[in-house]
Amino acid sequence: MNIIVIGGGAAGLMAAGTAAEQGAQVTLLETNEKVGRKLFITGKGRCNVCNNCDVQEVLRNVPVNPRFLYSALGRFGPADVMDFFENHGVALKTERGNRVFPQSDKAADIIDALFLWVKKAGVTIVHTTADELLIEDGVLTGVSAGHKTYK
Ligand SMILES: Cc1cc2nc3c(=O)[nH]c(=O)nc-3n(C[C@H](O)[C@H](O)[C@H](O)COP(=O)(O)OP(=O)(O)OC[C@H]3O[C@@H](n4cnc5c(N)ncnc54)[C@H](O)[C@@H]3O)c2cc1C
């Protein structure tokens, strides 16, 4: 199966890597020259990766419509996030308020881990801007970006 992911932020990188690990041919379109750029500024450059608590506690602290997150967090909660990064070489620490950061205090380590993971999983990263979704007979069939079409 061919999958196109638009945007190489935290969400797009996780989506692309997961799909590729499950056997899909994944092309990730990212407008910037590097993926994960916004992650550099998260947590004042340290990236507050998640909170070291159970899913119920996360949901109790979501001010608006926590039920929206119920399914996603049930499948991949804070413990899974921590396992993911530790298994991909990022040592973590828990600070005041159960906030989890890389031991290095560097958000760049989170970006590097995600980048290396998607590359190892076989994701093709193309630095281009997705302009338009291509829809044929009501079915999404691809994306146009620059002068190219990705089916
Ligand atoms: C100052 C600040 C601090 C934060 N701190 C934290 C924190 O410590 N912990 C935390 O969990 N969250 C934090 N956040 C929130 C976090 O940054 C976002 O929740 C997260 O980045 C969202 O990821 P995303 O992949 O959905 O979107 P983004 O990170 O915005 O990624 C979207 C990507 O898509 C690309 N893109 C957009 N349009 C196109 C297009 N047409 N074609 C190709 N590519 C395109 C963009 O270039 C970008 O790389 C912080 C946010 C800010 C602003």
Image (tube, rainbow, N blue to C red):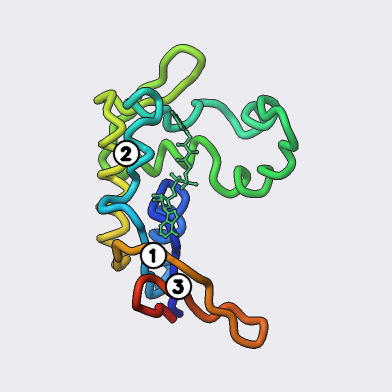
Which residue does the image show at 64% across and 26% down from the upper left?
A: 57
Quadrant for residue 29, please give it: bottom left
Quadrant of the image where one finds ligand 1: top left
Q: Distance from label 2 to label 1 (Cα)?
A: 19 Å
Q: Circle 1 sits on which residue?
A: 21
- Extreme residue in the top direction: 96
Tag 1, which secondary structure? helix
Which residue does the image show at 30% across and 65% down from the upper left?
A: 126
Q: Which mark is residue 110?
A: 2
Local crowd size for mark 3, using a 10 Å CA cut-off: few (<14), some (14–19), many (≥20): some
Q: Earlier in the sequence, mark 3 or mark 2?
A: 3
Q: Is residue 39 above or below residue 63?
A: below
Q: Amino acid at mark 2?
A: Ile
Quadrant for residue 128, please give it: bottom left
* 87 with respect to 75 (left or right): left
Tag 3, which secondary structure? strand
> How far from the left and from the top, in percent, is residue 134?
53, 78
Q: Circle 3 sits on which residue?
A: 3
Q: Is residue 125 above or below residue 47?
A: below
